[in-house]
Amino acid sequence: MVKKVTYSRIMGLFLEDYSRRVYLREIADELKKPHQTVKPYIKELVRKNILSEKKHGKFLEYALNFKNKLIYDYLTIAEKEKTQEFIEDNPLASILYEKLSSFFGDNTFIIFGSSVNGIKKGNDLDLFVIGKNVKDEIKEFEDIYSKKIHLIHAKTLKEVSLTFIKEVYKKHIILNNTESVLKFIGGLYEPNKLV
């Protein structure tokens, strides 16, 4: 499938590292598009103050601009597209998503670690649950689909260690409540550059 250049695909390049700084050529290479195709999108994101631009020699470097709070809307859309692609590409993830969806009102679910690269037969799945405990429902899923789920539960994000948050941040699929998770992580990033 040929993927178009979109603002959310560009923003998706920053999802695992909010401090990332990239050049136009890097963005074009990662999107597998000519830099002249990508350039107008980058310029528009700079014009909207979603990305910042800094000159290094004769090259321009781009980074997320957290001074503009609309950045969370752009990151949320990019995260949701990443989640949608993951669910479409992984039938077992689709089944798990449907199973967990009845708990979306009270919980937040994040798949993290190596599972983000695809749910392969035999590999376990790391699942971070924020909110009510759903251990019984997870056990039922494990029994039916012979898939081990390494479940980590917390009542709130604030009670989780910074070390664990950094681990989840590096490689994750946020199944629901995306914007609140991003604002929490962004809140850690902005003042302290922690993640």
Image (spheres, helix red, strand yellow):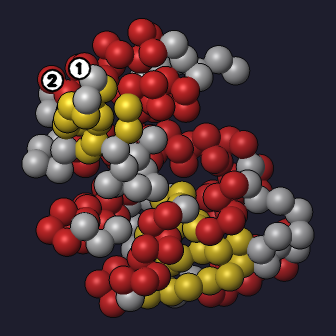
Report the residue at 38% width, 38% height from top. 22
- The C terminus, quarter of image: bottom left
Image quadrant assignment for residue 29: top right
> What residue did someone put label 1 on?
44
Secondary structure found at label 1: helix
Residue reaching furthest top? Answer: 36
- The answer to whether marks 1 and 2 mark residues whose Cβ atoms lie closer than 8 Å is yes
The answer to whether 49 is drawn above or below residue 159 in the figure is above
Identify the residue at image location x=55%, y=62%.
171
Residue that label 2 marks? 47
On the image, the x and y values in percent for residue 37 come to: 44, 10
Q: How many marks?
A: 2
Q: Amino acid at mark 1?
A: Glu
**Disc 1 crowd, CA 10 A, few/some/many (<14, 14-19, 20+):** few
Query: Mark 2: few, some, or many residues within 10 Å (few <14, many ≥20)?
Result: few
Image spot of residue 181 (x, y percent):
34, 64
Q: Is residue 156 visible?
A: no
